[in-house]
Image (spheres, rainbow, N blue to C red):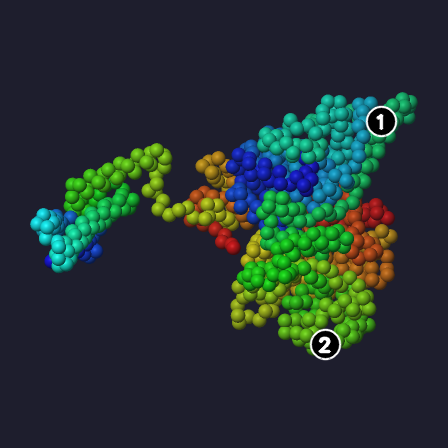
Amino acid sequence: MVLVQIKNLFQFFQNLVNSQEKQPILIFVAPDCDSICSCKILSFLFQTEMISYSIQPVEGYDEIEEITSKLRDSGIINQTIICINCGGNSDIYKFSNSELDWKFFIFDSHRPIHLENVFSKDQVYVFDDGSIQLAIPTLEPVNTELISPFLSKELEEDLSFENDEDLEDSDFSDIENNENIENIENLSENNENNENNENIENIENLSENEQNSDDFEQEIISVKRRRKKKPKKKDQKTMKISPLIENDEVISELDKYKKNKTNIEKYYSTTTYGLSTSVMLYTLSTQLNRKNPKLLWFAILGLTEHYLLEKIGHRDYLEIVKDFQEEVSYYFPVNNPEKSQSLDSLRFGDEYRLMLFRHWNIYESMLHSSFVASRLGVWKESGFSNLNVMLAKMGLPLDECKQDYQSMNLKLKEQLPQTFRKFAPQFGLKGLIFPSFFKKSAYDVEVTASDIVYLITSLIESAHLNIPQISDINKNFNSNEFSTQNEFSTQNDFKMENFWKAYDSLSNCSSDLFKNGIQLAIRIQKQIVSEGINLIERHSIVSSRSFRHAYLTELSGDRLFFKSATNLSKLGHFLIDIFRQSKKEVKPLILSSLIKEQNIYLVVGVSGTRSFGDISRNKFGQAFLNAATQIKAQIKRDRFESSVMEISIENMKNFMQVLHTLLN
Amino acid sequence: MNTEIAVELLKELQRTTEQLPKYDQSLVQKVIEETNRKQEQLHEMVKQKKYEDTISKTKLHILNYMIERNEQILTSYHLERGKKLIEMRWDFGSVIPNQIRENITQNEESFHHEYCQILEDYMNSLDLDLTQDHQPPSNDLYIEVRVLKDYGQIFIDGGQSIVELKKNSRLFLRRVDAENLIREGVLEHIISN
């Protein structure tokens, strides 16, 4: 594999451009805002170079398998595959085989990256913001032949799961961890060979194109491990630890082996996120001298999505915002009012954690924004009156706040920044204000990055709704006008259509789609807040020593939104925020929604830290896997977020019990 | 009387509803005769040295002018016809339709023939048929399309590459590869700004 650092992005692109290959590039895109923005940037860059490509939105590794298997069957030898926000945490090369000359380029913000992608293949390129390189565990070379007779029974069991029939239904990623342990041997062996024979920065095996670029060769940290043929059966292993290990050498090798194993386990134990891919691709466009405000806006959206969905923390966000602020003032200098009115312009400014209030009204936005709702405790009597008191103190008359923001008194609107800055901390709303960016189109209302992120995310997360683009003037903008799918039919998924609507809305958003999308986002948020409050008031959240858990059952009407993992995750973060504010211990939270038609529970694990704005590492990815393998349950865990999984209803109870014991 | 006959020629060209009216030999002849007469008159006057007084000078000027004008008109006439013949090569090809054939002279025919020859030689040297596309290539050499139904695999780039057409994916490829499938309804052109 090749870990390509950001500064060398442009070389990858030049190689693609210069390659003689005519085969259209296949781009797999995960369904989220950051991926869509990245895809937009990438497709723009390809279009300027007249490179053909094909975009395939995918939701999980099973879909990737479906598509790649067709390609494999047709025997296409040369194929370039780009994975956006997918492919990182699984051994991507397994979708190809040794007879084909496929190349994989992974732009994935999920961490940790699967070590197979890092260590074994030249055909896999992973683009690193720096965090991948830092996180890779140090592995020491081990003389496996020496220690193999003495390996513990425990290891034998780990390895034997490879052949376990019960895991048939679960995807490759379930066994990934076990494979990894097996691979420690291979890695160590290869490590040894490499040290003896080759220069680690061996360039001979690179493709012809890359050989032409000298700088690239020197810069790449190419960890070349020649892939050894993995023996199918571990027939060397015996079941017992020999009590007669007298040889010191063997003891030290065993120690090293165990150390490696622990390091690898630690590497996979928690998940987090790295740099947003759209930001990385914007950097690419800068290196290619093709950057422009449109691409900058996409990068801003990707970054904002990561921030709002709590994938990155406040500090990281601020760092990048600073850079973008400079970019914005470069494109749209403040002192230049002559700039053409017909172009979209961006500006830097303060944004509030009042979701979509500019397209709604202040009162409702406060009532329903996760940030405000959790801190003011608006479901309680005291909280509710607190809200009114706060608005009064701010000098915002209730009737003004309750009417459409657009029609609110201009003077009040102008004073809002000051007002919020002054009064927000007094009411426990510290952190209400954060720096962000605004976009003004010539004939439209100004929108913020958060607005668009919510719009896009809502469109994607509404697979059960057909969102109309053209409004019927006679119809009221009552959101019940959206036609819903039959509860029992899963065939009519508008998932794909909505994905593309979201994608297109970034280029030319019709005002109808915009209005509908905003309505949708508001609807989802209302549902999240009301569900959260519901769960709390009914005490449905079970707390154990190391985590909390709640079930969501009887999904109907708007609660159908909780069939989506992202919405569950948002709900989870909201609940964690509530616990944070009520000074209760902040524990990770698992939410399981029952999806009757498919006979499964959709389980999402969310975690948070004591202080808002810091990001904690999520340990559910590994925990789910361990619990499931222990009870030999059928689970489906092939989405790109490893803390999301589906489990059959029968196994749920058992699963939770085991999870409790494992984590407590 | 003066240059009116010549102007008649031009009017003929202008008025015609056909591609090319019949070459008016008689009229051309008349114009030539008239011009020659004027020329003789001019020569006479010069020979007899009858250009001392103003009236004679004027007359000489006018004669000269008329001669030149006739020449000019004749040249225009023939040039116009020639241009039309060239145009015909680009519109119809190297074979002149019979109706028009009737209207042109032997000279014009051989002019047309020679032009065709020159063009042919030039195109052969370029190995390119220039007369195929009258418009320059449009901006969208490559277009973005959405796939409306599962269609399986297709060959593009003259058979060099294979693409799998799966419903709900999008492609960016050459217009020529996509056009047939757009017509069939498998693909749909995405127009965006």
Residue at left 33%, top 34%?
A: B124
- The number of numbered badges drawn on the structure is 2
Disc 1 versus disc 2: distance between alpha carbons? 73 Å
| Dot 1 alpha-carbon crowd within 10 angstroms: few under 14, some 14 to 19, many 20 or more | some
Q: Nearer the viewer, residue B126 or A340?
A: A340
Residue at left 75%, top 35%?
A: A180
Secondary structure beneath label 2: helix
| Residue B28 percent across, percent down from the top left | 13, 49
| Residue A437 percent across, percent down from the top left | 67, 59
Secondary structure beneath label 1: helix
Q: Which amino acid, by three-letter code, is at mark 1?
A: Glu
Q: Position of A257 compared to A442: left or right?
A: right
Q: Measured along the vertical axis of the image, is residue A594 above or below residue A159?
A: below
Q: What residue does disc 1 label?
A: A253
Q: What residue does disc 2 label?
A: A398
Find residue A368 and report its image quarter. bottom right
Residue at left 63%, top 39%?
A: A105
